[in-house]
Image (tube, coloured by chain):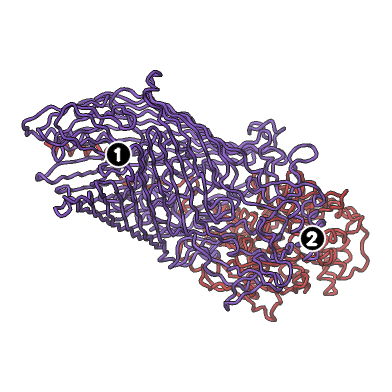
Chain colours: A purple, B red
Amino acid sequence: MRKLKPMLLMALLLSVQVLWAQISVTGRVTEERTGTGIAGATISVKNGTANAVTNADGNFTINVPQNVTLVVSYVGFRPQEVPASSSPISVRLVPGDNSLNEVVVVGYGTKLKRDVTSSVAKVSARDFENLPLPSFEQALQGRAAGVFINSGSGKLGQALNIRVRGISSISASQQPFVVIDGVPVVSQSLGSATEPDNPLATINPDDIESIEVLKDAAAAAIYGARASNGVLLVTTKSGKQGRTKVSAGAYYGWSEPTRKAKFLNATQYRELFTAAAENEGYDAAEEFAFETGTDDWNSTNNTNWADQAFQKGSIQQYTASATGGDARTRFLISGSYNDQKGILIGNRLTRGTARINIDHNLSQRFRVGTNISLSQSNNYRVPSDNAFSNPIQLNALPPIQALKAADGLNNRNTLYYNNLIELEGNNRNLNKTYRTISSAFLEYAIAPGLRFRSQNGIDFTNFQESQFLGRRTLDGAPTGYSFDNQVTSTIFTTTNTLNYNKSVGGSGNIDALAGIEYQKGLSRGASVEGRAFPSDRFTRIQNAAIISNGSSSETEFRFVSYFARANYKINDRYLVGVSARTDGSSRFGKDNRYGFFPAVSAGWVLSEENFLKNSNTVSFLKLRSSYGRTGNAEIGNFSALPLYTSLPYADIAGLITSQIADPALSWESTDQFDIGLDFGFLNNRITGELDYFNKNTKDLLLSRPLPATSGFTAITQNIGDMTNKGFEFVLNANILQGGAFRWTSSFNISTYRNEVTRLVSPITPGQRTLGRLAVGQPYGQFYGRKYMGVNPENGDALYLAADGKTTNDYNLGVDTILGDPNPDFYGGWNNRFSYKGFDLDVQAQFVSGNDVYNVAGFFQSVNGDYFDNQTVDQLNYWKNPGDITSIPQPRLYAGNGAGKSSRWVQDGSYLRIKSVNLGYNIPRNVLRNAKIESARVYVAAQNLFTFTKYKGYDPEVNTTYVGNLNLGHDFYTPPQARTISVGVNIGL
Amino acid sequence: MKLKQFAIVLLTAGSLSTACTKVLDVAPQQSIDALTAIQTADDVNQLVIGSYSLMGTGQLYGTNLFLLPDLLGSDFNAGAAAAARYATWVGTFQGQRQAFRKQMTRDNSEASRTWIAAYRTINNANLVLQNLDKVTDVAERNRLEGEALLIRGVMHFELVRLFALPWGATPNNSQAGVVIQTTASNNKDEAAAAAKPRATVAAVYAAVLADMTAAVGKLPASNGTRFNASTAQAYLSRVYLQQGNFAAARDAANAVIASGKYSLNASVAAVFSNRNTAESIFEIQQNDQNNAGQSNDGMATFYASLPGIGRADVRISNGFYNLYNDNDLRKREWYYLGTGARPADPANGVLNRYSGKWKSFSQNLPVIRLAEMYLNRAECNLRLGTAVGATPEQDLAQVRNPIRTNLPSIVNPTLADVLNERQLELAFEGHRIHDIRRLGGSVGTYAWNADILVMPIPAREVDATSGVITQNPGY
C-alpha cells in the first residue's frame, strides 16, 4: 500500500513539464543508528515538485534548481531538511514515529497524516516487535488512544475484548471489524467451546507493518454497516526495492502468573469449619464425611491445591524473512514458528506461519500483486472458567484432602472434581487451525491520476477441535469420551475501486474513490461424539462403542456494497472530505435490505496560515471535525426470520419453535461527531492529538424480553439507544534528542462515558451476575443487594433495606447501584531511551475506576458456608458480640452473607508495567568480520509489574461464560502471565 | 476518451460483483422459516413430538418436575427428624440449593428455567391446536388434538402446583395461580399479548380439568409410548387428589386400572431399568444420544453416585431409608451406598446413600406408574368408605405384592398405612411437596401453605410484563 504514494507523485510529476536551470545533486541516506543505507527514501524539494527515491544502498541523484532546500523523508523516520549545495550530501535519518508526514492507512487507500481529517490511531511494527505477545491485537493495549482492551483471562488463544470508543452495542458484536490487507477476516470464535477462541491468534505479529484503528465516522463510514465498533486495518510488511535483506530472529522466555490469591491451609481450614459447624449444631468431622465420603477431616494432609493450577510457562519464537526486489518486482518472504507453554497446566499454543507478498509492474500502466499467508496453530486449551475441570477451580478443594491417593494416582475422592486427572494419559483438548488470508490485485493506470484496482481476497479457515477424556475424568467416565468437530469458514471478498487524484487550479488537490464490493461468507461444520472405549489407550471415535452425538451445520451471509469518497485540499490548508457507502445484506429483514452510511469531515491546518506560519513555537496545528453514520451488521445471519427447529425425543425428532422475529430487523446505526486538534510544537519536537467524540447509537439490536407465557423469552428488535462520549489525548515528545542519550516519550489517556438512553424494559442481572442495563445508566452497571457488613451483636450479615436501614433477611433487602465495570479513564505511557548501541522501551498501561465482581466469592469468600476452601481474609470472622468485622459469623450451610451482593465487588483499577524491552545493537565493526549487517540482542518482559488493590488473581479479568453484559466479572478466571524473554535479531 | 474508459471499468466492476438483490436472499440451513413450516398432517404430528421433547428436557420431566418437589419437601435443619430430612442437596448449584434450604430468591435459576420451558411447551401444544385443519384424517386429528390438550393441561397443572400457593390455601382458591395460555404466538403482537395477569388457582385447576377431560374423549386407548386416554385419566386422578376431590380421583384411578392395559412388574427395579414396562402409564423416552443431560441436568446426573455416573448431589437421608422394612425388596433395589462421587465409606461410618431409581443417563423416566393409581384408589376408597374397583386392602396388597416387595399384606389398612406405603413406593419421584400440601403437613417449621415453599415467579417475567404478572408473596 505504501508504494502508492510515490507512484502517485510520479504520475503528478509527469504532468509537470516546466524546467528551470538545474543542477545534479547526489548523496546517500543512512539510518542514523546503524549507518546502513536506506532504500526507498524520498528526496524532494521543499515546496517544490522535484522528487527522487534512493536506491538499494541509499544513494540518490536528483536534478534540482540551485539553492533550494531538500526534504529527505522515509516512513518511520523524522524528515530532514538539507541545503542542495554541496554534493555529495550525507543524510542520517533519525527514527521518529509520530511524524506528521507519516503515511496512514485508511479504508481502501492511504493518506498523509497531516491531510487526515478523521480520527485514526496507528501502531507500527516498531512499537511491538520482539515482544512476547500472545496475539497481535494485544499490541494496541495502552498504545492506541480510544482503544480499550481487556485480555479477559490468562488462557492462551482466548478472545480479547477490544472496544473502540466505548461500547456501541448490546446484543450484536462489540468487537471492531478486522481487515487484513484489504480482506475482511473472521475475528470471532468458530469453535464449540463455551469460551470463544481467538482466530486472530493465528496471525504472526512479526508480519505486521502497522495496525490502524479507524475510530470516528469519517474514517470508518467507508466500511458502512460494519464499522460502528471501529475498524482495525492490519497492513502486512511488503517487499522493498533494493538489495535482498535477510533477517532472522529468535527469542525464548519464561512466564509465571502475575498474581495469585491466598487460601487457607489445613489448620486454618479446620479452625474455620469447626466454628461454622458448631454454630449450626453440626459436628464438622461428621458433616465433612457426609459431603465428601471420606474421613479426611482427621487426616494430616496439608495440600496447596490453588498452586497446582499453575506451571512454569515458556515462550519461544523463531522467525526468518527475506525482502528485496527491483524497480519492477518487489517481494517479501517470511516464516515463523512460535511455541507458548501457558502458566496454566495443560495450556499450550503453537503457531507456524509463512507469507509471500509480491508486487510486480507488468508495464508502465499495469501492476499486479499478491499476498499469501498460511498458518497452522495448535491450541491445547483449558476448560471454561465455569467447568469443574478449570484448573483454577482446584482452589476450592479442601487443604485437608490429599493430592494423591494411596495408589499413587491423583486422588479422586475430593470434595469437587480433582481436575488434575484431566492431564493424565491420553486426555487431550486440542484445537487445530489451518488458515490462509490471501488476496491478489490488479491495478491499471487508466490515465494520469485515474487508477483502477481490483482485489479478490479470501479468508479460509479450517478449525478442528479434538477432545478425549479418559475413564477417570469427570466427563469421560465411566468408559471414555471423545469429541471431534470441524468447521470450515470461507469469506470471499471482491473489491473493485476507481481512484482519481488531480491537482486543480494550482493550489487545490482532489482525491476521489468509487468502489463496489461483494462479500460472501460461508461456514460449514460437522461434529461427532463417541463414548464407551475399550480402554483409555483408544482415543478415536473409530473405537467408540456408542456414537452418542453427531451434528452438522451450515450458515451463510452475503453483502453487496457500493461506496465512494472524495477529499479536497486547497493550499495545503483547507481539507474537506465526504464519503458514503450503501450496504445490502442477507442478514437484514426483507423490509430493510439496504443501509446508507454517509460521512463528512473538514480540517483546517492553522499552521499554514500567515499568523502562525513563522511561529517558532507552533510548528503544526490542525483543527478537524467530522460527522457521519456507521452501522453494525453483526446481528446473526438469520435473526430477521421466525424459525422452527428440531428437537429429538429419543429415537425421533420433533419440531419446536426456536425464534420469533421482526421482519423489519436491520443494522444498528451510530451517528458520531468528532472534533480534534493535531498539534506540533518546537519543530514538531512535541506533537499530539486531542479528540472529543460523541457517538449516538440508535436501533440497538436487543433481545426484547417477552413474557415467557408467550412461549418465547425474547425477540430481537431494533429498540435501544445508547451514547458514548469521551476524550482522547495523545502527547509525544522528543525529550532528549541529538546527543548520545535519547529519550522519546508518548503518553495517551482516554475516557468514555456510556449511557443507555432508550430501552423497552431494564435488563436485570442473572442469578449469579450483577450486570444490568437501565435507561440513564452505563452499560453493564452493577446492580443488586448492598452488603452492609456484619451486625456486631450477633454476627449476622446485613443488607441495605428499603427503609434505608439494614436487614439480615436477604429477601427484604433492596437492589441498588453497586458499581460500574466501565473505567473512568485508561491509557498508556511509552518511553524509549537509547544510548549508543543500547535501547530501552518501557511501556506502562493503566485502567482506573472500573469495578470487578468476583462471582466466585459466594463459594470461596463466604465465611465457611460450605466446604469450599476459603480465602484467608475469611479468618477474620465475627466471633463474639461486639466484634467489628466485615466477615459474618461462619454458619455451615446457613447462607449467612451468601447472597449475591456488593460483598464481592472491588475496585479493579490497575497500573501495569506492560512491556519492557532492553536491547543492544552490536557495533558494525564487530559484525563486519562475520559478514553480518546488523545484530541486536535484547531482554524483553510482558506484564512485569502490576499495581492494584484487587484481592483476587488479576484485575484484568472478564469471564466470558456470563455473556457480554456482565463486564468485569471474575469467576475462577486465570490471571495474566508475566513473561521475561531474551532474544536476538540478525540482519544479513 | 477518458469517459469511455471509465464506463468500461465500471461495467467490468459491476459484472464482477454480480450486484443484484437476489443474492441477498439466503435461506437458513439448520432451521426452517416459520411461515412455511407447518403445512401437512405430518408437520403437525412433528409439532406434537416436539412437545414431548420439550417435556423431556431437564427443565421439566427431564429433571426439575421430579427434583424440585422433593427438594422443597425435604427438611434441611440439622435437628430435623431423621425421616423428615428425606433428601439432602449437597451440590453446588445455587438454584437447587436455594430450593432445598428454603432460601429461594426471585431470580432463582430453576424457577425461571422451569417456568419458561413449561410455557414453551404450552405454546407448542397451542400451535398444534391452531393447525389441526391441516390434518384431514379424523382419527388422526382427534389423536393429535387429544395429545395437545393433555400436554397443555399437564403443563398448567405442574406450573400451578409449583408457582402458586396450594389448593386450599384460601377458602375459594382465589389466590393467584398462573397465566392460562390457550392461544399460540405466531408473531410479535401475539407474543406481546401473552402478558396477561395470573388467573386464580381455582380458574387454573378448572382449565386443567377441562383440557384433561376433553383429552380423554379425543385420545385413543393406546398410542405407543405417547399419551393415550388412560394417561389422561391417570393425570385426572392426580389433579382431583390434589384438590381433595376423592371421589373423582378414585374414579379416574379406577378407570386406568380397569382398562386392564397395565400390570405391576414382578421386579421393582424393572420400571426404572427397562423401557416402557407393563407398569408404566407414561414415561419420558430417552436414549444414549438424546437425554436430559449428563453433567448439568438429568436425573442420574444429580442422583447417582456410581463410578463415572452422577454428581451425587442428592443424598438420601438414612432416616428415611430406615422407614423401609428390612425385608422390603424396595429397600435393597432402590437404595445403595455411593461408589462414585461423594462415595460411602462404611468402614469409617460414612453411609452416603443414593436413590437407585435414577442410575443411568439414558434410562426412560417414568412419570406415572400403575402403583400410584392403586395407592390413589386405596386412599380415596378408605377416606370415602367405599370399595370402588377393589377394597383398600386389596389395592395395598397389589403394591405390597410379595413377589415385588417380599412383604406381608396389611389386614384392614388405615389411612396412615396407605399414606406410609405411598411415601415408600413413590419416593424420589417428585411427589413429596405436593403430598405434604394436600395432606396439610409441614416441612420443618414451614407449614404446608408457607410462602417460602412456593417457587418465586421468575423476576424476568414480572419485569417483562411490567408487573402484569405479579410476584408471589415473600419474594
Residue B365 in the image: state x and y as whole percent.
72, 53
Residue type, label 1: Gly
In the picture, the quarter occupied by the N terminus of chain B is top left
Depth check, mark 1 against mark 2: the one in front is 1
> Mark 2 falls on what kind of element?
loop
| Pick the front one: B203 or A29 | A29
Residue A192 in the image: state x and y as whole percent.
54, 44
**Mark sitting on residue A738:** 1
The residue lying at 29 percent from left, 42 percent from top is A104
Left or right: where does residue A58 sit relative to residue B314?
A: left
How many neighbours does mark 1 have within 10 angstroms: few (below 14), some (14-19), or many (20 or more)? few
Residue receiving disc 2: B426
Do the CB atoms of the residues marked 1 and 2 lie less than 8 Å apart? no
Q: Examine the rendering and report whether any part of residue A434 can be seen.
A: yes
In the picture, the quarter occupied by the C terminus of chain B is bottom right
* Quadrant in the picture for residue A172: bottom left
* Both marks 1 and 2 on one chain: no
| Pick the front one: A452 or B92 | B92
